[in-house]
């Protein structure tokens, strides 16, 4: 099962031999073999070179999550040649997206939260297979014209990330975007409820599958 596709991943459903999560204040990464796993979540990762070079390479890794890492860039991410989903939470020292272009053929989900210093460049714009892009609580965006660089994008979220020119029309004009998440601001030219209506007008609602487990639910986007 491709758990990485789910909006909310139920990690308890992933076999133990395919998922490792580590608090690196308490455990050493070198004590674990990650070459054969598909899902890896790390807390408090640190590296003197401020990149990913001290995380062992893996051609099997599909999902990588970093929480409170001290990285400044994403150099060495090319060692995860089949990575489908990357999540960066509270990586507050992240400054640039250097390295991302090396996984442009595989990456489909990118979640970045609380990286105010981040400046996006052609590295991020090279991710032509991206379907989900979350830039929440990140550095200011001059405009949204860059969205046209993602021909397969379905879901774009920029909660607490300001778009300086206030023009949200590129969201409406994007041919595949179906859902968006943001907070209204005075200078934005389209309110959130109006934008939701415009996106619904773009076509069928048959673009995602809801997945149920007991009283809980999540979803994944259809191919």
Image (spheres, rainbow, N blue to C red):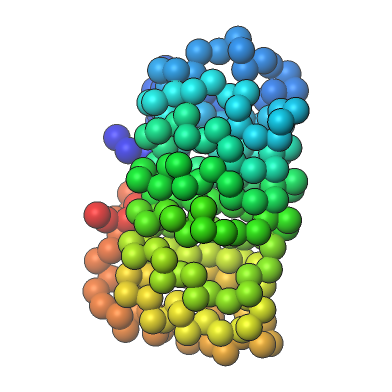
Q: Give residue 44's quadrant in the image.
A: top right
Left or right of 162 in this view: 149: left
Quick check: 154 left or right of 123?
Answer: left
Q: Is residue 151 above or below residue 65?
A: below
- In the rendered image, residue 25, in percent from the top left (x then y), is placed at 75, 23
Residue sitting nearer the eye, 220 or 91:
91
Q: Is residue 79 left or right of residue 92?
A: left
Instruction: List x then y, in percent, for residue 18.
Output: 41, 22
Q: Is residue 180 above or below residue 21?
A: below
Point out the image quarter for the C terminus.
bottom left
Residue sitting at x 66%, y 79%: 164
Give coordinates of residue 97: x percent, y percent: 59, 50
Residue 10 is situated, as x and y percent measured from the top left of the image, at 45, 38
Residue drawn at point x = 67 percent, y = 55 percent? 118
Q: Is residue 197 visible?
A: yes
Q: Is residue 217 visible?
A: no
The image quadrant that residue 183 belongs to is bottom right
Residue at image point 58% right, 76% down: 143
Q: Residue at x 51, y 53 (%)?
A: 123
């Amino acid at each position: 099962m491709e758990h990485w596709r789910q909006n909310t991943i139920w990690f308890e459903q992933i076999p133990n031999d395919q998922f490792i999560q580590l608090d690196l204040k308490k455990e050493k990464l070198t004590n674990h073999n990650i070459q054969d796993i598909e899902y890896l979540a790390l807390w408090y990762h640190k590296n003197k070179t401020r990149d990913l070079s001290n995380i062992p390479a893996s051609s099997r890794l599909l999902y990588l999550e970093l929480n409170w890492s001290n990285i400044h860039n994403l150099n060495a991410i090319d060692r995860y040649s089949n990575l489908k989903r990357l999540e960066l939470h509270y990586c507050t020292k992240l400054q640039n997206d250097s390295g991302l272009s090396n996984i442009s053929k595989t990456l489909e989900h990118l979640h970045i939260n609380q990286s105010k210093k981040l400046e996006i460049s052609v590295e991020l714009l090279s991710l032509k297979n991206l379907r989900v892009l979350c830039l929440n609580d990140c550095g200011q965006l001059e405009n949204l014209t860059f969205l046209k660089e993602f021909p397969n994008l379905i879901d774009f979220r920029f909660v607490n990330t300001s778009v300086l020119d206030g023009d949200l029309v590129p969201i409406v004009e994007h041919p595949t975007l179906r859902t968006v998440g943001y907070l209204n601001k005075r200078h934005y030219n389209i309110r959130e409820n109006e934008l939701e209506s415009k996106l619904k007008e773009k076509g069928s609602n048959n673009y995602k599958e809801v997945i149920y487990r007991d009283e809980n639910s999540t979803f994944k986007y259809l191919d």
